[in-house]
Image (cartoon, rainbow, N blue to C red):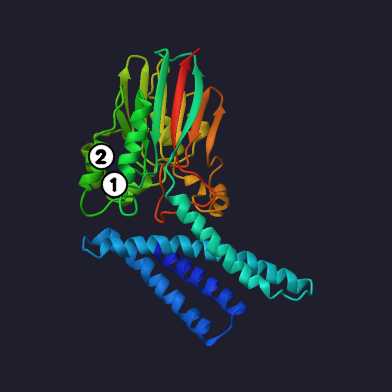
């Protein structure tokens, strides 16, 4: 953990220094020289203070500082991304012995400002209902509908109003099952009672079930499980329930956070009854080949589809499938972009969603 924080701190300082340095290159002055020193110090202090307050304190200062830190993370990433592209352009022009046009720095400011505005607007967007239709021979009912919730990260930055609106949207669909594929709860020293009261209103014919994401572990597993239970969600940890004969719903903890290997996962899958229609909840989109033909449907989240462009390109370096519906053998898989966001209440060129999956018997 200490190594992670050391690397994170170095990365945060580096992003600030690079962004401020690029700005100074195009706009050299006494003011921007001060900014070159001030931005890394103030920005890093804000971000690290936000993370410290989130885990250790319940003072009145919590929400404004943490929210400011979250927004600054998003703003910093966008500024750095634009600065990086401009810096590459400057290097390329120098290599070609072409003078750097004076408007390039101003263009970078305009693009950064535009992207930040779009990202803030995108973060406030109501989740779209993503309708997915599947056919299945072994379904024990004529039709089964599933609403998937993933990556809601309920906590600071996600208002009670947004949670209530999500519940209304889902209940209007009248799903047979509501399945929560992790990162449901962002944590805090106390459970968030208003959000719990809103989530208790989730209604599904065969129940509401959830699996653990990595943030449930970061928030403290006991605290997270208490939140699930209080909100009326049945947590499934390497466990299976049968809401009706012939239908099985299983949940497996986040592979990385719970240190679950492909072999461990395979051992769990071998406990499933192949005669059932098996639905599996797993937060992290991995081990698809292991699950092939062992389950009928596997639901994942975690990636946020990158959340803020161009982070989606980096996510693709880690995961083969970042978003969408695909199939291996007889198994269908769906990786969702998530219902809200983590950290910065921002989304740039990605949409948040509530997948609504309808399965009809062939």
Marks 1 and 2 sit apart, C-alpha to C-alpha, by: 8 Å
Element at label 2: helix
Q: Can residue 254 be seen in the rendering of this structure?
A: yes
Q: Is residue 215 above or below residue 333?
A: below
Element at label 1: helix
Q: Is residue 328 left or right of residue 11?
A: right
Count residues near mark 2 (Cα–Cα under 10 Å), then give few for <14, some for 14-19, many for 20+: some
Q: Give the residue displayed 43% in from the left and 41% down from the top.
A: 127
Q: Give the residue displayed 40% in from the left and 17% down from the top.
A: 276
Q: Give the residue displayed 68% in from the left and 76% down from the top.
A: 102
Decide which of 125, 206 is in the foreground and name it: 125
Where is residue 303 drawn, in percent x and y? 48, 45
Q: Is residue 213 above or below residue 20?
A: above
Q: Give the residue displayed 38% in from the left and 23% down from the top.
A: 272
Where is residue 136 drawn, in percent x and y? 49, 17
Count residues near mark 1 (Cα–Cα under 10 Å), then give few for <14, some for 14-19, many for 20+: many
Name the residue beneath numbered marker 2: 198
Looking at marks 1 and 2 on the same chain, the residue that comes earlier in the sequence is marked by 1
Q: Can residue 295 be seen in the rendering of this structure?
A: no
Q: Is residue 360 above or below residue 108?
A: above
């Amino acid at each position: 953990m200490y190594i992670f924080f050391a690397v994170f701190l170095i990365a945060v300082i580096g992003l600030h220094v690079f962004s401020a340095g690029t700005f100074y290159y195009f706009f050299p002055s006494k003011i921007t020289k001060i900014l070159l020193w001030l931005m890394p110090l103030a920005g890093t202090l804000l971000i690290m203070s936000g993370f410290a307050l989130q885990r250790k304190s319940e003072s009145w200062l919590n929400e404004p500082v943490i929210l400011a830190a979250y927004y600054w993370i998003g703003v910093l990433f966008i500024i750095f991304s634009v600065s990086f592209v401009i810096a590459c352009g400057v290097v390329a022009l120098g290599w070609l012995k072409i003078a750097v046009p004076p408007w390039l720095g101003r263009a970078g400011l305009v693009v950064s400002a535009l992207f930040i505005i779009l990202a803030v607007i995108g973060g406030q967007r109501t989740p779209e209902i993503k309708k997915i239709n599947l056919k299945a021979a072994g379904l024990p009912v004529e039709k089964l509908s599933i609403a998937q919730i993933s990556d809601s990260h309920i906590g600071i930055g996600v208002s009670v109003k947004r949670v209530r609106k999500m519940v209304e949207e889902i209940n209007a669909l009248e799903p047979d099952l509501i399945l929560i594929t992790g990162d449901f709860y962002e944590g805090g020293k106390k459970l968030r009672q208003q959000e719990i009261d809103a989530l208790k209103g989730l209604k599904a014919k065969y129940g509401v079930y959830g699996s653990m994401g990595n943030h449930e572990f970061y928030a403290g597993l006991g605290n997270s499980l208490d939140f699930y239970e209080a909100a009326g969600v049945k947590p499934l940890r390497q466990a299976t329930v049968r809401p009706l004969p012939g239908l099985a719903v299983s949940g497996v903890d986040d592979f990385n956070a719970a240190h679950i290997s492909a072999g461990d996962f395979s051992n769990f899958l071998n406990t499933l009854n192949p005669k059932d229609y098996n639905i599996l909840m797993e937060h992290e989109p991995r081990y698809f080949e292991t699950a092939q033909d062992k389950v009928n449907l596997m639901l994942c989240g975690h990636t946020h589809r990158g959340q803020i462009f161009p982070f989606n390109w980096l996510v693709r370096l880690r995961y083969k499938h970042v978003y969408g519906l695909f199939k291996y053998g007889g198994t269908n898989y769906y990786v969702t972009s998530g219902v809200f966001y983590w950290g910065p209440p921002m989304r740039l060129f990605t949409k948040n969603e509530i997948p609504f999956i309808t399965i009809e018997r062939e």
